[in-house]
Image (cartoon, rainbow, N blue to C red):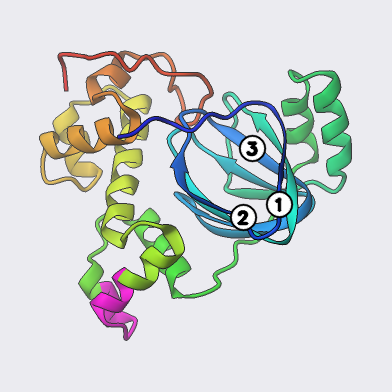
Amino acid sequence: MGSFAQISNGRERWDPHIRIPRHRHDRAYAALVLSGSYEESGSRGRFRVGPGDVLFHDAFDAHLDQFCSSGAQILNILVEGFSMSSIGHIADPDSIARIAERNATEVGAQLRVQLRPIQRVHYDWQDKLADDLLRDPGCLLEQWAWNNNLAAATVSRGFRKVFGITPAEFRLEARARRALAMIAADEVPLAVIAVAAGFADQAHMSRAIRMLTGAPPGHWLRSNRFKTVGAAGRPNTGHDSRD
């Protein structure tokens, strides 16, 4: 696992037709679109967003971004303990931006007040596959391809073109995030969590979680950071003898 991309409160401006390669943040945050539009493909699926739309990211989510002809201005908001759907909408994004400039601690509360849900959109079969893998990380890719009248090679290439990773890699990350959430929620034996999350064994789960987060499962069992996965804060990723 490489280094995490940095994220902080504040505005970002992106020029037209910029493509940001797939990257991962170790903090949870919301991205509020103030102007322009872009497409994001990541751990929660693919979204096309415009002014007022808000994309939420859990800690350790990964995504790539492609900006449209207008570029975009985005307000990043670090969110702690925020129970998040993937996407929402704010009717008056400028009001959130003004609050963020005055008081960074108040903006999260106002985001909760103004946020409205958005209906998820599937643009193509890649979006359906991403949703199926998130819902069932045990999904068998060859069977999925057969059920959807696609060749297995087409599924692998087409999915990677949109998300920057293969369906098998996406599935592995989904399993790791599911296991991490279970570890945070209840201290049941790691071997039990591994099976429930779809891993062949505990060792396989440990490798996947370390690759995702930089720390082994044993670290997260003892950590106060994740009462719910996605709480903000930078993890202590020092070595841990338990994995």
Q: Secondary structure at mark 1?
A: loop
Contact (Cβ within 8 Å) of mark 3 with mark 1: no
Label 2 neighbour load within 10 Å: few <14, some 14-19, many 20+: some
Q: Secondary structure at mark 2?
A: loop
Q: Is residue 37 above or below residue 83?
A: below
What residue is shown at x 17% (from left), y 45% (from top)? 199
Residue 220 horizontal side relative to residue 64, left or right: left
Mark 2 or 3, closer to the camera: 2
Q: Is residue 215 above or below residue 162?
A: above
Q: Where residue 13 sits in the image (x, y, percent)?
A: 73, 43
Q: Where residue 62 sits in the image (x, y, percent)?
A: 45, 44
What residue is shown at x 41% (from left), y 61% (from top)? 130
Q: Where residue 159 sits in the image (x, y, percent)?
A: 38, 67
Q: Which mark is residue 18?
A: 2
Q: CA distance from mark 2 to mark 3?
A: 20 Å
Residue 150 included in the magenta stretch of the image: yes
- The residue wearing badge 3 is 30
What residue is shown at x 57% (from left), y 29% (from top)? 7
Residue range in magenta is 144-156
- The residue wearing badge 1 is 15
Label 1 neighbour load within 10 Å: few <14, some 14-19, many 20+: some
Mark 3 or 1, closer to the camera: 1
